[in-house]
Image: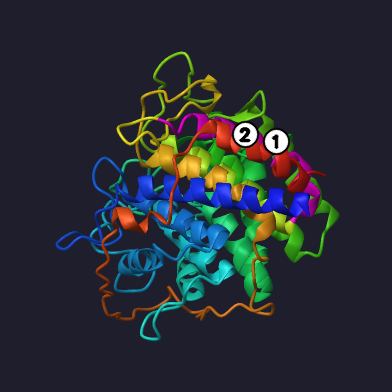
């Protein structure tokens, strides 16, 4: 009985902490205000990061059951689908890259897998939106250089068009693998395999499963940029785990998933996640606005991996527990006393940095500690309700705009309490180890 009581306290405190961090993050969002554009974040945040943020807010509902933000999240995810229902809105088309589009599609895929509230019948389903992006990726697969692969950018006039990178191809791999699992359609799996093979052949996936940033097609990808980022490792980790699940536990995909997980160790210092390519705990850091959010994606994809590839559980949960406690130590800053900073490895209080990326990263790792209490990710055959369209993205269709006027107020914080590292560390020392042990 005492154990049950400790577990209840653990779940309550983690939900409460997640609510506090989510509220701090959503304060940056103004797209639900009259006159603003739904789905967009204000400067300096790019469009792709908004899509990533709403994907993590789908996770927030999935982990906590808190519906406070659901209408806002649904509005945002539908307002940016564009006239062809493919996450190519006219307000972004000229600057949009393959990875930008992919983060919105992965948010839609998460909504389908977690059974987030479905769109109205007049709108495309979450599954159909992900299928549209997949189909457009297939049409953009470029064999003219480097033996294949997706370019970073979609249009020739954008800087980076000649760069074939891991995050664009990681989006393709991740979405293809998840569509294969959700629908049971082998065509999606075949493209996941094609993308994986290309990554290996071109040298962006090393023999030890390190994922490197990208390569230029101006040299036919003869040289590789060996920078490593958390989000590249995470996007392939979860995709490989999905393929392991889809193939009913094949030895090949187990080896690949284990290899990616083992190579993730470069992103942990004393068991605490950090962005080793740009984060320096001795200074204010050199990570740019985008990079400040990258830890959020490794956190969320690590947690999801434990759900569908259970052999990864012990290793991943050790990383997530240690990182969550450290992240919480950085969430005691700002005028509200609960603003989150960047440097989890600083072993100190708030580092003075703040923003969407810092809040998103802290939220993702803290709420991931509830992974044992949430339902399995669904498929078409296990209770999924999202409407699909296998031909989406191959033609043109019109959609009506979605209008939801919701203002987030202090009263929406769902009883958010003062967030301290002591609280997180305390529950991890008790029920945390019991719930998430071996």
Task: Please provide percent x and percent y for residue 210.
Answer: 66, 35
Do the numbered discs 1 and 2 sit on residues whose CB atoms are within 8 Å? yes
Residue 54: where, in percent of width, then height? 41, 57
368 horizontally vs 341: left or right: right
Left or right side of 273 for 92: left
State the scheme by which the image is colored.
Answer: rainbow
Question: What secondary structure is marked by label 2?
Answer: helix
Q: What residue sits 81% from the left and 52% below the top?
A: 252
Q: Residues within 10 Å of mark 2 (few under 14, many from 20)?
A: some
Alpha carbon separation for disc pair 1 and 2? 6 Å
Q: Point out the stretch of residues depicted in magenta.
A: 309-332
Res. 131 visible in picture: yes
Residue 394 counted in the magenta span: no
Q: Residue at x 40, y 86 (%)?
A: 121
Disc 1: which residue = 429
Whether the magenta-drawn stretch holds residue 318 is answered as yes
Which residue is tagged 2? 425
């Amino acid at each position: 009985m005492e154990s049950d009581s400790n577990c209840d306290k653990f779940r309550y405190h983690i939900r409460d902490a997640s609510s506090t961090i989510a509220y701090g993050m959503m304060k940056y969002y103004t797209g639900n205000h009259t006159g603003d554009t739904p789905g967009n974040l204000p400067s300096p945040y790019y469009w792709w990061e908004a899509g990533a943020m709403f994907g993590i807010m789908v996770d927030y509902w999935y982990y906590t059951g808190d519906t406070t933000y659901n209408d806002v999240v649904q509005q945002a995810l539908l307002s940016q689908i564009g006239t062809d229902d493919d996450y190519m809105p006219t307000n972004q088309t000229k600057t949009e890259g393959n990875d930008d589009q992919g983060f919105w599609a992965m948010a839609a895929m998460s909504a389908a897998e977690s059974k987030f509230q479905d769109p109205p019948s007049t709108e495309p389903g979450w599954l159909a939106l992900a299928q549209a992006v997949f189909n457009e990726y297939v049409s953009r697969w470029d064999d003219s250089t480097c033996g294949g692969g997706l370019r970073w950018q979609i249009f020739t006039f954008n800087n980076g068009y000649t760069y074939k990178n891991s995050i664009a191809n990681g989006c393709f791999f991740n979405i293809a693998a998840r569509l294969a699992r959700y629908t049971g359609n082998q065509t999606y799996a075949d493209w996941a395999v094609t993308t994986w093979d290309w990554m290996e052949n071109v040298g962006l996936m090393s023999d030890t499963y390190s994922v490197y940033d990208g390569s230029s097609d101006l040299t036919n990808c003869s040289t590789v940029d060996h920078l490593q980022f958390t989000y590249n490792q995470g996007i392939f980790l979860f995709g490989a785990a999905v393929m392991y699940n889809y193939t009913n536990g094949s030895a090949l995909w187990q080896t690949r998933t284990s290899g990616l997980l083992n190579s993730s160790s470069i992103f942990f210092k004393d068991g605490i996640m950090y962005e080793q390519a740009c984060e320096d705990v001795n200074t204010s850091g050199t990570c740019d606005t985008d990079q400040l959010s990258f830890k959020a994606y490794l956190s969320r994809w690590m947690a999801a991996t434990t759900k569908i590839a259970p052999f990864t559980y012990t290793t991943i949960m050790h990383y997530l527990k240690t990182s969550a406690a450290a992240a919480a130590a950085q969430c005691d800053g700002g005028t509200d006393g609960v603003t989150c900073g960047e440097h989890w490895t600083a072993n100190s209080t708030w580092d003075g940095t703040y923003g969407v990326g810092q809040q998103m990263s802290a939220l993702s790792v803290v709420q991931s500690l509830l992974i044992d209490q949430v339902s399995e990710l669904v498929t078409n055959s296990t209770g999924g309700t999202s409407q699909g369209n296998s031909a989406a993205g191959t033609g043109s269709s019109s959609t009506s705009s979605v209008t939801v006027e919701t203002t987030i107020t202090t009263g929406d914080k769902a009883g958010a309490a003062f967030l301290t590292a002591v609280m997180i560390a305390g529950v991890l020392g008790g029920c945390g180890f019991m719930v998430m042990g071996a």
